[in-house]
Image (spheres, grey):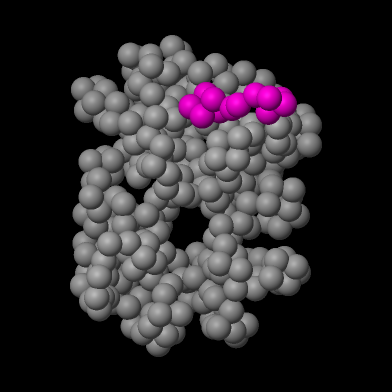
Amino acid sequence: MKICLVNISLTSGGGVIWDCLKSISDGTLPREINKEAMNIYLAGGISGNLREFWQRVMKIYCASPKSRAEVVEAMKVYIAGDNNKKKILRETLYGDDFFVKEGAQALSHINVLESYYYLRKNEEFMALVHHFGSFLLDSGAFTFMSGSHKGEIDWDKYVEDYAAFINRHDVKLFFELDIDSVVGLAEVERLRAKLEMLTGKKPIPVWHKNRGKDYFIKMCREYPYVAIGGIVTKEIPRQFYEKAFPWFIQTAHQNGAKIHGLGYTTVANLHKYHFDSVDSTAWLYGNRGGYLYRFNPDTGLMEQMQSPANSRLKSREGAVHNFNEWVKFGEYAEKFL
């Protein structure tokens, strides 16, 4: 599994992030490496809490672009989410030599999930996308509906704009508009077919319980990458969908498809449910809840550390710490989950 955080620097002088990651990259983990492991993607930085950092990165990148390592296929956990706290990682955490020397490969350690809804107005960030370990694009359809948009939605126009964005930036992995609950499955299929026609690529279809078991099998036979939705929205109670995970994962793999668990990062269970990728906003929760995460390399789990009594977690410092700990988990997951 790969845990993708939205900004990691392995360059010397890289500040807090560098200090955290260097201790990992210099060490060895006493476990057998799983060559078909999972990738964990931490997202939400480009559109939200790490935006200030990316603006800094863009300035340096444009001045001194370097080639990056090719994407390494592994199981990916996409850490998704948008947050308005834009000062989690400030410029002062990074040395001026970011993206110089070893920093040229810094982004290849990061997997990112972001929403088209936010990126359509922040296209300057797309110059960095091809240097990430991997990038997954969400359609942003539900965010669009719940945002400032008023009145009837022209979904054909939305798909056309979405496809143009995908083509413009040569996005490889992107979700369909899984808005079954709004327009019905037949319309979702029509929009998916249009998206395929306009991009010349197969999107990632998202299974929801209304589609049924046979439809999932059909998805796996027709698409190289599929996803299970409804976890975050609790379409199916947790105790039921976790019992079904082995069947979904086995069915996908038997048909030669990869499978993504949308919004699923119950860390302890990632050791037994071998998705090819998952995404989560879990790395943001500690800062919101006032606690710190700590990655335990002996158990391969994320642990929560509560703040001492009569103390208050410093928001920025806590967020940076939690970010670093999820980076550690991501590197572990790439090798062993």
Q: Would residue 95 be found to the left or right of residue 35 on screen?
A: left
Q: Residue at x 45, y 66 (%)?
A: 204
Q: Would residue 85 be found to the left or right of residue 261 on screen?
A: left
**Looking at the image, which is closer to me, 78 or 49?**
49
| Image: 179 above or below 8 | below
Location of residue 291 in the rendering, given as x and y in whole percent from the top left corner:
64, 34
Location of residue 92 in the rendering, given as x and y in whole percent from the top left corner:
38, 16
Q: Main secondary structure of the magenta part?
A: loop
| Image: 265 above or below 210 | above
Q: Residue at x 44, y 84 (%)?
A: 185
Q: Which residues are magenta?
A: 307-318
**Does the magenta portion include 59?**
no
Q: Residue at x 25, y 78 (%)?
A: 152
**Quarter location, residue 107:** top left
**Quarter location, residue 305:** top right
Residue farthest front in this picture: 310
**Looking at the image, which is closer to me, 47 or 217?**
47
Q: Is residue 65 visible?
A: no
Q: Is residue 32 visible?
A: yes
**Looking at the image, which is closer to me, 154 or 331?**
154
**Quarter location, residue 11:** top left
Residue farthest bottom in this picture: 186
Q: Residue at x 25, y 53 (%)?
A: 120
Location of residue 194 in the rendering, given as x and y in whole percent from the top left corner:
28, 77
**Looking at the image, which is closer to me, 161 or 314?**
314
| Image: 170 above or below 126 | below
